[in-house]
Image: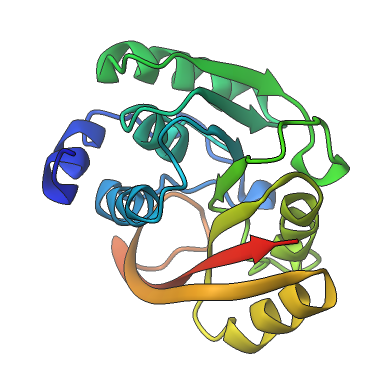
């Protein structure tokens, strides 16, 4: 198995959004964060020879990280066609042996019926924008419908919400860790050139 640092280096070539939309909270997932999440999933037996679905895949960081770890199938799904085009370019840069199916669809509408042993990986909108509160709840609801296990990135302070949602929907949080999330200045309301926030990653096993 390649090391976590080697995986992060491979993912360093993954380009972000050309024209990110604030309404969709489109931020490039940092390669180090993606490598940590995928490496953890691989150690748990949740990647190799399984179907992996990246809900709200953006430009493909998590999907491509999973594709580098020997899954059977990878699907990257996003509602916005522009980043999907970038994701296809990123796939060629990364050069994984497992190809990714890039699908335009709404991740909150349970748009696919994958096999029972499916793993979901996702960095959903945190719901930080006014009018978009709890946007990550709908992504978790989809994961509960289609996944045996999911890995998701959330805003700091989400533990009570994630654990409660999982328990109410036949799931259980089995692993959790904090991670740094670098936010570049890319929207008008940003008043700093860059900012690093604390994010939280959760592994949920779904019944």
Q: Residue 62, relative to residue 87: is it above or below?
A: below
Along the horizontal axis of the image, is 135 left or right of 76? right
Residue at the spot 44% in from the left edge and 28% down from the top edge: 71
Question: Which of the 4 image quarters holds residue 14?
Answer: top left
Residue 68 horizontal/vertical position (percent): 31, 28
For the N terminus, the quadrant is top left
Residue with the most extreme right position: 109
Where does the image place residue 176, in percent across and percent down from the top left?
Answer: 45, 75
Image: 19 above or below 120: above
Observer-nearest of 31 and 73: 73
Is 122 left or right of 48, judged from the image as shown?
A: right
Classify residue 22 as left or right of residue 39: right
Q: Position of residue 77 (x, y in %)?
A: 65, 30
199 shown above or below 56 = below
Residue nearest the observer in this picture, 172 or 181? 172
From the top left corner, tell me how far across and down residue 183 is, in percent: 37, 59
Query: In this orientation, does residue 184 appear?
Result: no
Which quadrant holds the C terminus?
A: bottom right
Can residue 104 be seen from the camera position used here?
Answer: yes
Decide: is 205 above or below 80.
Answer: below
User: How many numbered discs?
Assistant: 0
Query: In the image, 5: left or right of 92?
Result: left
Q: Is 111 or 3 nearer to us in this picture?
A: 3
Q: Residue at x 53, y 26 (%)?
A: 74
Q: Residue at x 43, y 49 (%)?
A: 186
Residue drawn at x 69%, y 48% is: 147
């Amino acid at each position: 198995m390649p090391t976590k640092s080697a995986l992060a280096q491979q993912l360093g070539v993954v380009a972000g959004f050309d024209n990110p939309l604030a309404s969709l909270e489109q931020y490039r997932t940092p390669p180090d964060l993606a490598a940590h999440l995928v490496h953890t999933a691989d150690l748990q037996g949740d990647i190799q020879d399984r179907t992996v679905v990246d809900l709200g895949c953006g430009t493909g960081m998590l999907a491509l990280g999973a594709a580098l770890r020997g899954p059977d199938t990878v699907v990257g799904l996003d509602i916005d066609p522009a980043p999907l085009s970038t994701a296809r370019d990123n796939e060629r840069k990364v050069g994984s042996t497992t190809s990714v199916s890039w699908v335009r669809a709404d991740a909150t509408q349970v748009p696919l019926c994958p096999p029972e042993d499916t793993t979901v990986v996702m960095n959903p909108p945190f719901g930080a924008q006014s009018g978009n509160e709890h946007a990550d709840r709908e992504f978790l609801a989809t994961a509960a419908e289609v996944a045996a296990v999911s890995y998701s990135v959330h805003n700091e302070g989400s533990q009570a919400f994630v654990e409660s949602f999982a328990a109410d929907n036949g799931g259980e949080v089995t692993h959790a860790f904090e991670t740094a999330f670098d936010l570049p200045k890319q929207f008008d309301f940003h008043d700093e050139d860059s900012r690093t926030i604390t994010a939280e990653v959760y592994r949920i096993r779904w019944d």
